[in-house]
Image (cartoon, rainbow, N blue to C red):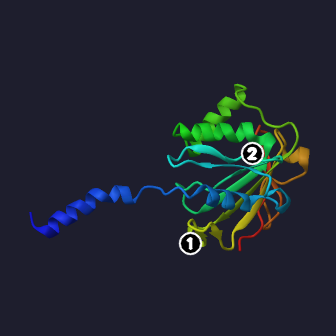
Amino acid sequence: MKPSLFLASLSLLAAPALAQTVIPAPDIQIKTAVLAAPTDKKDGATVIGYDTDGKYITLRKGTNDLVCLTDDPNQKGFSAACYHESLEPFMAWGRKLRMEGKKGPEMNEQRDKDAKAGKFKMPKQPATLFVFSAPSERYDATTGTVTDGNLRYVVYIANATAQSTGLPTKAEVPGMPWIMDAGTYRAHIMITPPAK
């Protein structure tokens, strides 16, 4: 075999290894996870991220009522989320289903069935979720820097409806609060400020 063909075949064998997901260091995961948190909650939030095998792990045990999830390195773009601890059963169930390989509509359908079966509970009171996101080109995973990210707000109110809240079922102008999944266990108010 010619040396050039041999080297080319080696590069093809090595290609899958180059495509593997790189998990950021724990300090970077913590730094980026709390970008979604209100300022007064950042230092005391619990942070859930990924170990070197890509499995969920608690990176930092918190001292307040906020739980933050770091960006999923397998997903395009950047997205970190923080939520009130009362939402943890709902969120933990979603993480469990993801680890089982479920995603998208399949995951939502399974979680809906499991909620009806009483496998987890939603909070009785309103509970907030904050999501901070940005396109891939605005995120540097080596430094944990996000440029011009967008923050959106979600308030879960189980079984709330447009009638019970007075909210519309879609936003009529950017940033207008509206209710999504109305009348279900995962009903929530969406507030999405205009993108930067």
Left or right, residue 11 beside residue 119: left
At label 2, the amino acid type is: Asp
Which marked residue is nearer to the observer: mark 2 or mark 1? 1
Please state the horizontal and vertical placement of residue 65, each as a whole percent of the image: 83, 46
Left or right, residue 180 beside residue 101: right
Residue visible at 74% across and 45% down in the picture: 181
Residue 56 or residue 115, whichever sits in front: 56
**Residue 190, visible in the rendered structure:** no
In the image, farthest residue toward the left:
1
Quote the CA–CA distance across marks 2 and 1.
31 Å
Q: Earlier in the sequence, mark 2 or mark 1?
A: 1
For disc 2, the marked residue is 181
For disc 1, the marked residue is 137
Q: Is residue 153 above or below residue 104?
A: below
Left or right, residue 118 beside residue 14: right
Image quarter where the N terminus lies is bottom left
Q: Is residue 2 above or below residue 126?
A: below
Please state the horizontal and vertical placement of residue 30, each as a whole percent of the image: 67, 57
